[in-house]
Image (tube, rainbow, N blue to C red):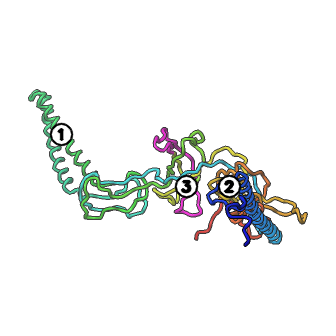
Amino acid sequence: MQTNLLSPKTSSPSSVPKSPSSAPTLEEQREQRRRTRKAVFKVVVGIVAVFLVIAGIKASQIMAMIKGGKAMMAAMPPTVVTSAKVEKGNWVPILHAVGSIAPVQGATISAELAGTVAAVGFESGTPVKKGEMLIKLDAAAEEAQLRSNQAEAELAKADFERARDLANRKVISQAELDAASAKLTQKLAAVENEKSLIAKKQIIAPFDGIAGIRAVNVGQMVPVGAQLVSLQQLDQVYANFSLPQQDLARVQVGLPVKVTTDAIQDREFEGKLTAVNSSIDPATRSVSVQATLDNSDHALRAGMFARVQVILPDQKPTLFIPATAVSYAPYGNSVYLIEKKQNEQTKKDELVLRQQFIRTGEARGDFVAVTDGLKEGDEVVSTGVFKLRNGMNVAIDNKLAPDPKLNPKPADT
């Protein structure tokens, strides 16, 4: 019978399995950390590699788009534009204002006394002369009272003459003579007062002028103060307007003035500045100014709106361009300068736009003054600036370019 050389009790220690609850050794922990770091590093390297690949693809796409855009721009024909030169001229400084037309002499005729209209002595809108009867009110009662007062005055006069004769003969006292004299004076005053009332019942023209539309008719009862008709003298008229206080030092009586109004197209009225107010309005800080204009044909009427230009005596050199050449924007006004540049690829000269910011001054007609940013002789795009951009290639064609003028006269549409 064979016997086992090695019994369970005498088995080797290495063949005994480890307990699941036994902790890893220090060496095993270090090895595990090294494997973890290596795995994280590989993941980071992979992410970076993917990012670099994507960035390279995008960069190549962008470069291709840029090259395609340059090729397209090179292939596109230049944009056709109109041009204008920056000009220099002596502009007469002008102060602009708005005002209204007023007659040199005008009044609204009113009734001083109440009464019934008995007669109208004018036609509406026609000239009348000084002293002509305009409106006559019924004065029958006043005329009857006048005759009564005149009779009493005659009696008082006779009594006074008798009293004076008796006083000279020492028949009556001086006091009785004075009473007779006072009575005569009182009766004469009553006569004059009645004549004055009758005269006021007949309204006459106080000056030569143009009568307006009458506001009353025959038989109409008018109260005290009722407006009957307006009367305007229009051979000369005033243009009343205001100027800012900073212009006061530049304004003086005698300066030439030009006036236009929308009511009369294509006509300019000339006159002179005749009055400057002695005070400034504290609310608006402006001074009232008055000019006198000849109006022999009565074209200007009282109350018309007027545009006024005060011509100052000094002149100054001014750079100006067409107003259509300016691109107006909140951050600054600009123009597009037309410059010659050599194409780097073709080595040929091309016309290229360069945006130039400027400062503008007074506008006059179709032009605007330039105070900074340009010099005489510069060439700018004159129309269609809103569709242009900096660096654009252009070609000039002025066949259909508009003709700007300092004193344009647009057609009445």
**Magenta stretch: dominant SS?**
strand
Q: Residues within 10 Å of mark 1 (few under 14, many from 20)?
A: some
Q: Locate residue 304, reporting x and y percent.
A: 48, 58
Q: Which residue of the protein is positioned furthest toward the right in this rendering? A: 347
Q: In this view of the protein, can residue 313 be seen by the observer?
A: yes
Looking at the rendered image, the quarter that the N terminus falls into is bottom right
Mark 3, residue position: 307
**Mark closer to the observer (1, 2):** 2
Q: Locate residue 217, reporting x and y percent.
A: 30, 64
Q: Sequence-wise, which precedes: disc 1 or disc 2?
A: 2
Question: Disc 1 and disc 2: Cα gap in Å?
Answer: 148 Å
As drawn, is 327 to the left or to the right of 273?
right
Q: Circle 2 — which element?
A: loop
Mark 1, residue position: 186
Q: Which residues are magenta?
A: 260-288
Q: In this view of the protein, can residue 394 be seen by the observer?
A: no
Q: 120 and 347: which one is in front?
A: 347
Q: Give amino acid for label 3.
A: Arg
Question: Disc 3 and disc 2: Cα gap in Å?
Answer: 104 Å
Q: Locate residue 179, reporting x and y percent.
A: 13, 33
Q: Is residue 279 above or below residue 342?
A: above
**Mark closer to the observer (3, 2):** 2
Residue 24, label in figure: 2
